[in-house]
Amino acid sequence: MALPSVKPAPSPDEGDEGPRAAAVTVRGPVRAAAPLAWAAALVVLSRIAPVVRAAPVLGVLRGPLALVLLSAALVLTGATIAAAAVRWRPRLGSLRGPTLLLVAWAFLGAVGLAYTMRLRVSGDEPHYLLMAQSLWREGDLDLRDNAAREDWREYTPGPLVPHYGAPRADGRPYPAHSPGLPLVLAPLYALGGRALCVIAMSLAAAALAREAWTAARGLTGDDEAALVAFSLALVPPVAFYAFHIYTEVPSALALAVALRLLLGPPGVAAAVAAALLVSALPWLHLKMAPAAAALGLIGLVRLRGRPRAAFAATVALMAAGFLLHYRAVFGVPSPLAIYGGVPRDESGSPVRALAGLVLDRSFGLLPCAPVFLLALAGLGALARARAWAALLVGAAVLAPVLGWRMWWGGQCPPARFLVPLVPILSLAAAARVARSRTGLARWRWALIALGVAATVGMTWRPEALLLLNRADRPTRLWAALSGERPVGIYLPSIVSATPDEARVTLVWLVALAAVLTLDVLAHRRERVDRLFRGLGLPLVLLLAVGLAVDGWARRSL
């Protein structure tokens, strides 16, 4: 079902002549320069000692963040003036999938290779590569000989101790990580080492971007909204995991393609392909098993006749093979056998995990990619479009993460466990943009540009380790941007369960609710919609958050 494509209302001044037209001509540049004026005013205030004593949050602008703010305001001003002066607009309807795929791959591949060739692997990456080496060289997952030979020296100086789960039925150790990704990487590593694996991961991320474009175009019928969905794979978190050896991007791609096949024209070949992709998800990571179950349910409900029979038979055969694998290894036909039963880490607070996945300063989605505000604002539009299949799959992706004690994902770039949710979030963002160009939708390209800039900026100097976070340690990104006042204290570290962090989280939740409420009102009221033009509203909100943190939330400072 396609959502109606809504064009922005024409300016009330459009077509005026005479004195009024002259007034509009004068007001245009003045209005365009407003973002630069807002930014410059705050930077000037941050240099006045009495003002900073009254509002300590302005101290964050006595450092690199001031330059970032002024640069963003300057770019926004220039773009506004250029858009008003140049009447040409790109013909988005002429865009084609292969072109978008190549553009995304060129960007993600270039960033990824430049980053990974200057930095060793981290987190779970060496463990997936060691498993791939073992599968290629010995045809098994017994990593003892690989560790003894120090095979890991090919991509890290080490030392590396393999991650083991529960022992096999015969007592030998077995890797704690699922074997699906190493199986895919094994021939790639044999042919081109880590570099070829990175190239393949960036290609998978580019294919995910194209899938997002295809799905959004089919849902909304709006070319610009589809391009917004495509762009969400060029910003964090997908852009960060496009060159890290993790299961997240392959899982997201398998999920997106399977959903497209199940919702597209029914056919036996498409049903079998969807079944294979659905069945691959638990092999990539056990946390994707609920998403596989949701897709399986969609297939059984959506398909009819021979396609449904082919889908059900393929899924049943693949599920039997999956369980037989665990029986052969552990003596028990259960994937939980690798953990020795229900994992002890499945004991976290869902509320805390959800807040952390969205807002945590090190691992949250919005601090590294605020463009996903569009997705949060678009969930209602997605529900109104009756995209229940997408919403069901999204809930299934999220469900196992919410109960996981380590919802942040360990030592890794931000928002690791939300990468498989991006196909659904991109649809929600497209639905929001297609509904109207008011409110948050006015910020779409500025937020996307900010996300792309973050991708480039945070990977420019790999040795600075701006991408890698670990538990509640200070985030290097915010430390690099800090002035006299640390930026990080104004963002919650939800990994740390302290009263201060809880209060900071509450402040941000109120600010988030305010933005989303204003977005709803902007669709109905022109006066509210005007607030979203320029930098005034976001800067006032951020200043209010900072004042609330200084005056109430951070009591221990």
Image: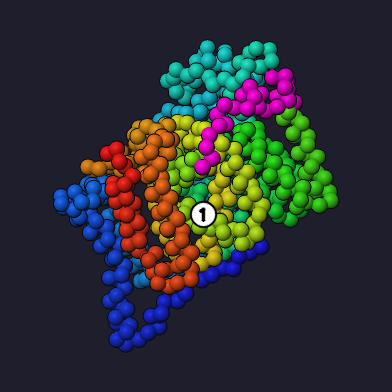
The total number of labels drawn is 1
Among the 4 quarters of the image, the one containing residue 333: top right
Amino acid under label 1? Ala
**Disc 1 target residue:** 375
Residue 204, x across and y down, in percent: 57, 42
Assign the N terminus to one quadrant of the image: bottom right
Identity of the residue drawn at 29% across and 86% down:
19
Assign the C terminus to one quadrant of the image: top left
Residue 81, x across and y down, in percent: 33, 67
In this view, the residue farthest toward the bottom is 18
Identity of the residue drawn at 38% across and 38% down:
499
Among the 4 quarters of the image, the one containing residue 340: top right
Q: Is residue 17 left or right of residue 414?
A: left
| Res 325 seen here | no
Disc 1 crowd rating (10 Å Cα; few below 14, some 14-19, many 20+) is many
Residue 473, x across and y down, in percent: 37, 32
Q: Is residue 340 magenta?
A: yes
Of 332 and 253, which appears nearest the observer?
Answer: 332
Q: Is residue 486 magenta?
A: no
Q: Is residue 484 left or right of residue 461?
A: left
Residue 375, x across and y down, in percent: 51, 54
Among the 4 quarters of the image, the one containing residue 330: top right
Q: Which residues are magenta?
A: 324-351
421 versus 433 height, above or below: above
172 versus 374 height, above or below: above
Identity of the residue drawn at 70% across and 50% down:
261
